[in-house]
Image (cartoon, helix red, strand yellow):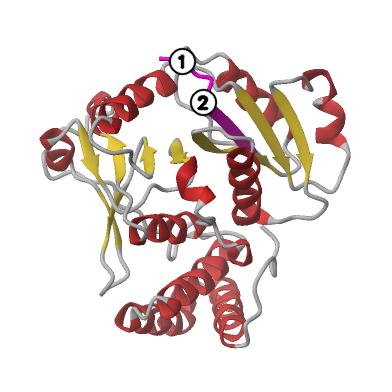
Amino acid sequence: MKNSGFAAFIITYERTEILLNTIAIITNQTFPPAYLLIVDNSFSDNTQNALKQYISNSFEYHRVGYNSGPAGGAKIGLENLANLGYDWIYWGDDNNPPRDKNVFQEMFKGIHQLSKRGKPGIFGGKGGSFNPWTGRVKSLSNKELRAKKYAGADFIPGGQTLITNAEVVRQGIVPEEKLFFAFEDLDFCLKVKAAGYKIYVDSNSWLRVRLRDNYKKDAYRWKGSSFGGNTSFPREYYSTRSLLDIFFKRQYYTAFAIVFFKSLAKIALGFRFGWNYGKSMARVQTSALKDFFFGKFGKQVDL
C-alpha cells in the first residue's frame, strides 16, 4: 500500500519540545504520511524558529496568527490538506502521538479492507456510541470490540488517531471553529454520520491495549469523571458551552435540557468540595450558560 495519498497535520500551541517529539514519532512510523502540516496557534516565534530545519516539499508550517484552539486548528488542517488533493488525513494534537511505530500501518490495513465495500468517513484507534436523547457518549466495551475486527462507532475522540476521508472535507464538512475547545470532535463526527458516511475503530489494536493493562472482562468500558476531583475548570466551561450548542442546533432538546440542569446542579453542588472549588465551578458554569445564550463563542477563558 502506498502512502502518497496520506497526509497529516498536528495542532500545536506553545509546546515546542512536545511537538518535536511528536513529529519524530509520526515521521518514524512504518507507514508515515507523505506530507506533514504543522498548524501553529502560538503567539511566540519559538515554534516557528524550531521548525525551520524541517521545511521541505513534504513538510509545511502554517502559523494561524491567533489562538484558534483545537477546533479552528483542525478546520485549517483538514481544509488545507484536502485542497492539496490527499485522500486520507490524520488529525493530530501535539501531545497525543501514536502509541507505537506501527499504528498508521495497522490502521491503513483496516481502511484498505473497508474500502472494498465503500469508503468510511472516519477511521480511528478508539471510539464510542452516542445517545441523542441523553447526550451521553459511551466507550465501546470489550464485548463489542471482540465482536468485529473493525467496529462501527458514532464518534472518535480527539487524540485517538482520527483519520478522515478527505472526500468528507471536500463536501464542506469541517469542525466548527467557534467551539474552540471541547467536543469539536463529537460535533464533526455527528456531521460526518449525518452525511451518510460510516465511522470505524480498529477493534483488535484497542483490545490488545486493554488486555495488556489487565482490563479483560467483556463488560469493561472506560468511564471517566472529574467532578469534585482534579477538575479542569476551563474544560468545564468549554464542555458545557459546546454541548449546549451542539444539542440545540440538532434539536436534541432532551439532551440539551440534561446538560443545562446538570450545569445548574454543578453550581449548587460544587461547594460540597470546598469554598474555593465551589466558587470556581459556579463561575465557569455561569459563564458557560451566559455565553451560550448570548452567542459568545471562541476563546473566552484560559486553558
Residue at screen point 50% across, 56% down: 173
Q: Quadrant of the N terminus?
A: top left
Q: Is residue 174 above or below residue 222?
A: below
Mark 2 residue element: loop
Q: Is residue 193 above or below residue 238?
A: above
Q: What residue would you read off at disc 2?
A: 5
| Apparent side of residue 130 relative to residue 172 in the rendered image (left or right) | left
Coordinates of residue 214 in the picture (x, y in percent): 22, 29
> Looking at the image, which is closer to me, 215 or 145?
145
Q: Residues within 10 Å of mark 1 (few under 14, many from 20)?
A: few
| Apparent side of residue 240 relative to residue 189 in the rendered image (left or right) | right
Do the residues under discs 2 and 1 have CB atoms within 8 angstroms? yes
Residue at screen point 63% across, 87% down: 294
Q: Is residue 225 above or below residue 33?
A: below
Residue type at tag 1: Lys
Mark 1 residue element: loop
**Mark on residue 217?**
none
Residue at screen point 66% across, 79% down: 296
Coordinates of residue 36 in the picture (x, y in percent): 64, 28
> Looking at the image, which is closer to me, 25 or 52?
52
**Residue 282 appears in which quarter of the rendering?**
bottom right
* Residue 59 can be seen in this image: yes
**Residue 20 appears in which quarter of the rendering?**
top right
Coordinates of residue 185 in the picture (x, y in percent): 47, 54
Coordinates of residue 135 in the picture (x, y in percent): 32, 70
**Mark on residue 2?**
1
In magenta stretch: residue 57: no
| Apparent side of residue 14 relative to residue 96 in the rendered image (left or right) | right
Region rendered in magenta? 1-10
Residue type at tag 2: Gly
> Looking at the image, which is closer to me, 252 or 256?
252
> Gap in Å between the C-alphas at discs 2 and 1?
7 Å
